[in-house]
Amino acid sequence: MVSAREVAKAVPDPELPMLSLADLGILRDVEETEGGGVIVTITPTYSGCPAMDAIRADLSAALRAAGYAEVEVRTRLAPAWTTDWISEEGRRKLAGAGIAPPGPAPARRPGPVPLTLGPPRRRPGCPLCGSHDTEELSRFGATACKALWRCRTCREPFEHVKEL
Amino acid sequence: MSSGDPREPLPGRHEPFLGNAYEALNQGEDTRWAYGTGFADPLAGVDTRVPEGVDGADLAAYCLMLGDDALIMSHRLQEWCAHAPELEEEVALANIALDLLGQARLLLSRAGAADGSGSDEDALAFLREAGGFRNVHLVEAENGDFGQEMARLLVFATWRLALLDRLAGSRDPVLAAVAVKGVKEVAYHRDYAAGWVVRLGDGTSYSRRRIAEGLAAVWPSVPELFVPHEVESRLAAAGVGVDPATLREEFDAVIAHVLTTATLTPPAGPGGSAVPRGRDGTHTAALTRLLDEMQSVARAHPETTW
């Protein structure tokens, strides 16, 4: 029997299916209980991300299919998920699927949260041609975690997982 | 049976015929759909014990205040779906509404757990009368034009970001965690609204007039944001909540920075008029109309599951 941790790690993210939950960095704990059950603890990405409910269901289904009778999925809110927890492998898979991976999450300095007027300082490289001459089209995209960008060299639009 | 019989299966079609499109979508995949087996409790597995020395009813009321602000603002933003000036802006407004809805779900669930009532998020969102809602008036006002919405979102996000940033130090670990996550989200909302206020204010004479009108329409709702309710004062003293009066300085500084960049001046204060008390459950007819729509399905089909 495959360990519950290995099963849980391999479950794909429903909205970024090239990533496993392990790549995404939301699995906090996988604990096998004495009665053949599993308690999985996950951390939400965004407060309103509708994929979280699908992820709970997918984890449950995958672990049951692997022979674990009872599956409980728990939420852990703190510490909050950050895109820094996406693995190196996950970043390679994102880029391979044409999605620019996030840069380092902004470090928080003391004092009020700074306002950003104008384009972001850091520009992701184009995942298609590699150019760094890119521009932000919209900070909000098809899912909560992505922004829409365009490459000024190859002219292709692309998605970018924004730093959180 | 002739070859033209419409009942004959299409060539190559091996799927069993399903009675309707929803059945076809829904095959064994219930939980992928919002109308499926229901969302899980967003606080499943989270320790929701009330911190020592804190009144559970006060904590629940406070969570409703912050949760209702997010829920009603989210609904107003959702009303822009299919009405925004550009597809990109529509997607942005829907994303912001989704973040706020997520914050509302966590806060309403926390409210139900804090007062021992066990009310879940759905009961609190869909079965309360307008008088039970504790949101500020800013969020319940009917939508105006896009400029007015950007003015409202700038005011709301600037105020809420300052609030959540302080709430991150709450003695209640659930509120603190919701706030830490919310700060990152609302920082994006504020940047978005500020960007549009600058673009419209520093744009054409026409766009400038429209955003100035939008700011003037929103401005009378600003003073209420900084008047503490007795529950807010008690929880602030207990190290669990935030006294909204303490947010004014940061709010004024950010708004002044944005308006200066936008070559706009702040509208004159509302002057002398009584400050509304949404936190006490006093609301305008606009909230009643909003709830009529938002709650209609839940009220028409109580306890229904799909």
Image (cartoon, rainbow, N blue to C red):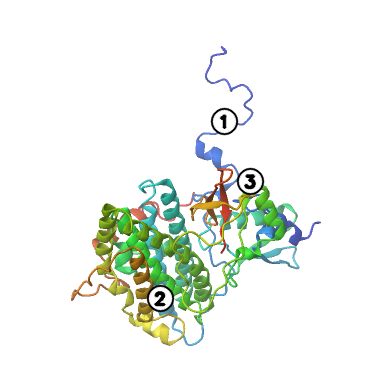
* Residue closest to the far left: B272
- Please state if A1 lies on the left or on the right of B224 as rendered: right
Identify the secondary structure beneath mark 3. loop
Type of amino acid under label 3? Leu
Who's the residue at 44% across and 83% down the image? Answer: B55
The quarter of the displayed image where residue B190 is located: bottom left
Type of amino acid under label 2? Tyr
Q: Measure the alpha-carbon separation of dots 3 and 1.
A: 41 Å
Who's the residue at 69% across and 56% down the image? Answer: A90
Type of amino acid under label 1? Phe
Residue B120: x, y in percent?
46, 65
- Subunit that carries the residue with mark 1: B
> A152 and B123: which one is in front?
A152
Identify the secondary structure beneath mark 2. helix
Q: Residues within 10 Å of mark 2 (few under 14, many from 20)?
A: many
Label 3 belongs to which residue?
A128
- Subunit that carries the residue with mark 3: A
Label 2 belongs to which residue?
B62
> B57 and B178: which one is in front?
B178
Instruction: Give the vertical position of B55 relative to A103 (above or below).
Output: below
Mark 3 vs mark 1: give the one in front. Answer: 3
